[in-house]
Amino acid sequence: MSNRLPIIVLAGSDSHPGTIPAELSPSAMLTGPKGTFQLRSGRCMAAELIARIRASQRFAEPLLLGPRQWYEGKVDCEVSHVQGTMIHSLRHLTDILQNRFSGAQPVAVAPCDILPSSADFQRLLDEDYAPHADAMFWWQMIEGQPSAMGAGAWKPSYRLPPNVGQVPRSLYPGHLVIARTCALRFHLMNRMLELAYRYRNRVLEKRYIGMTCGILGTLMRQDLRNLAKFQVPMLTFQIPYLGLRGFFGYRRGTAALSEVENFLAKSFLHRRFHRAAGGRPVVISVSSLLSFAKDIDTQAELEELDSSGP
């Protein structure tokens, strides 16, 4: 790829951690600002990630979002100060995206608690992202089995075929997003991401119910704004319907990754972009790069990845 992508690293710490998975004890979970944890390389986790991003030669100079007092002197990149809950970080990210980057420019966003090698960053962008570089919103799901996830074998995977009628695959959520600012419904997207983060470790049924109840007020407010612009107020009915259809389709084994793309397009993107990029404005690539599924949540995962090196 000839043009290097801007990249933002999210390095805050929410004081309200998610539900502890049934397979793990509270003592197994990492607590506190993970980006500041010291590694064998001598760098903190955020600094190690930034070094690997630079070494990949696929990105512009990284920008880290987090509390300046945590990272000053520990990372050698620009730090944009933000402190507080997940929603504070998302709102600050929104401000950065809208004020510092041109609307049509793709921008990458990653959390500070993944440690892919520089070669993995190169492969992800060259092999998985580049064929879909005109997408408004790009993400990846990682194909793999629990036995290949090491200390992260407890993480939930999802059995989905790429398209209806194809063979289902065992997929883990990836942790790098590339999006174009001009296309995003930030208010609605941030609310959905906040709810997804809050319910991330709960069983699927409780996750769906909690997210649906939590999003209804936001959908109604967005529809009122749409009505003021003489647009048909569809979101309050469309998004819960698509979510409900996807939920039961997944339970029956009939859901496909292409339907998730459609749901995200209807939820995250302004209407005028729903037919962009050849009618596929949201792309979720299936990748084999397990390092992008291995966000570090436990002490065992941290020790395993730290000992393996880049």
Image (cartoon, rainbow, N blue to C red):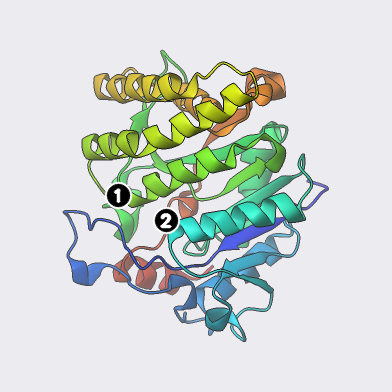
Q: Nearer the viewer, residue 159 or 260?
A: 260
Q: Residue at x 77, y 39 (%)?
A: 104
Q: Nearer the viewer, residue 248 or 266?
A: 266
Report the amino acid beneath label 1. Ser
Rendering coords of residue 224 (x, y %): 52, 27
Vertical comparison of 78 with 193: above or below: below
Q: Is residue 213 left or right of residue 177?
A: left
| Marking on residue 285 | none
Vertical comparison of 172 with 252: above or below: below
Q: Is residue 43 visible?
A: no
What residue would you read off at disc 1? 147
Q: Residue at x 44, y 37 (%)?
A: 218
Rendering coords of residue 11 (x, y %): 52, 67
What is the total number of numbered labels drawn onto the structure image?
2
Question: Secondary structure beneath disc 1?
Answer: helix
Q: Nearer the viewer, residue 292 or 117?
A: 292
The quadrant where residue 228 appears:
top right
Report the amino acid beneath label 2. Lys
Q: Residue at x 28, y 21 (%)?
A: 248
Rendering coords of residue 30 (x, y %): 32, 70
Q: Is residue 248 visible?
A: yes
The quadrant where residue 160 appears:
top left
Marks 1 and 2, how far apart in space? Answer: 13 Å
| Marking on residue 294 | 2
Vertical comparison of 192 with 51: above or below: above
Outermost residue, front side: 228
Label 1 or label 2, whichever lies nearer to me, is 2
Question: Secondary structure beneath disc 2?
Answer: loop
Q: Residue at x 64, y 18 (%)?
A: 230
